[in-house]
Image (spheres, rainbow, N blue to C red):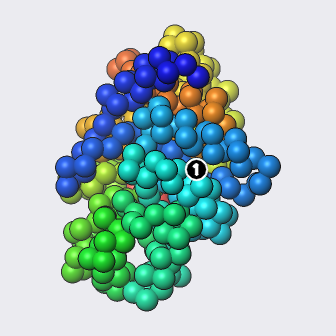
Amino acid sequence: MENETVDTIRKEVDKRRLTLGDGTKLPVLGQGTWHMGEDWPKRDVEIEALRLGVRLGMTLIDTAEMYGEGRSESLIGEALADQRDAIFLVSKAYPSHATREKLIKACDNSLKRLKTDHLDLYLLHWRGGTPLEETVRGMEELKKAGKILRWGVSNFDTKDMQELWSVPGGKNCAVNQVLYHLGSRGIEVDLLPWLRDHQIPIMAYCPLAEAGSLKAKLLKNSTLNQIAEVHEATTLQILLAWAVRHAERDGIIAIPKAAQPEHVLLNAQSAAIRLSSEEIEALDRIFPRPSRKVPLDIV
């Protein structure tokens, strides 16, 4: 790809940033890696995709020890070890590793696979049976040791966040990573407002409805397709533009997975798409948020 094209797209991506509580600025579009690294013949293409995404400004890379039982982390370590200073690296721990001792060991193993000495953000992947107070102690110990710079949670609903906020050190939570896309808007009822009030950003996974049966329904929707035509974009690009439509206001980072360079390019180009208020209202009518609290969607 021509450097001029990369620079043009990156400028648009760089315009869309939000600021963490410690002043760190992050792009509202990052890169997810679920299922990447699991198929050896695809490895070179996946590495190319990750490296292109960084060149295009999507420098936040999200992974987890669960993804391919460490194979995703190993892929990232191979792909981006020479660009460590340019990326914001996120990984997640199994809830079965949420005790102090197991958390430290899990983090060490992730660091080894990722070929780095620290994570920019370490998340508890979902809540298990370990008391939150013990997990927070483990996270804070990892911070003190310099192995992680920040910690957060994933798949925490409002009551979980309220409980976390009440334990010692719980207010140091930097991010909550949850499912969010046009077909799954339950977080807008109470979780998103609570997080916004407490200045905790959301990291939206599956913003293209990658998991589940809703994706086909969304892609066939005539209104979505018409909006895509207006913007000379794909329907998936409109879904991604919708996910970050109020990113700076609401504190939302979307982390779509793209295992092929051409899909990475499309994701990055969506940063330049600005949906009009009329288009957003039209999508609200077809895919409204729930009228009351619903269980948190998880995949």
Q: Residues within 10 Å of mark 1 (few under 14, many from 20)?
A: many
Q: Residue at x 47, y 17 (%)?
A: 4
Residue under label 1: 79
Q: Residue furthest front?
A: 82
- Residue 122 seen in render: no
Rendering quarter of residue 2: top right
Residue nearest the observer in this picture, 253 or 260: 260
Determine whether, in the image, residue 134 is placed left or right of residue 155: left
Residue nearest the observer in this picture, 45 or 171: 45
Residue nearest the observer in this picture, 88 or 128: 88
Estimate the x, y position of residue 285 in percent, counting from the top left.
Answer: 46, 28
| Residue 180 versus residue 131 in the image, above or below | above
Say which quadrant the C terminus sits in: bottom right
Q: Residue at x 50, y 13 (%)?
A: 231
- Residue 20 seen in render: yes
Q: Residue at x 56, y 28 (%)?
A: 265
Q: How many marks can you see?
A: 1
Q: Residue furthest right?
A: 41
Q: Residue at x 47, y 31 (%)?
A: 56
Residue nearest the observer in this picture, 100 or 56: 56
Instruction: Tell me which amino acid carries mark 1.
Output: Ala
Estimate the x, y position of residue 109 in percent, counting from the top left.
Answer: 53, 75
Say which quadrant the N terminus sits in: top right
Q: Secondary structure at mark 1?
A: helix
Estimate the x, y position of residue 192 in percent, counting from the top left.
Answer: 33, 51
Determine whether, in the image, residue 235 is placed left or right of residue 201: right
Determine whether, in the image, residue 288 is placed left or right of residue 259: left
| Residue 274 versus residue 120 in the image, above or below | above
| Residue 100 versus residue 212 in the image, above or below | below
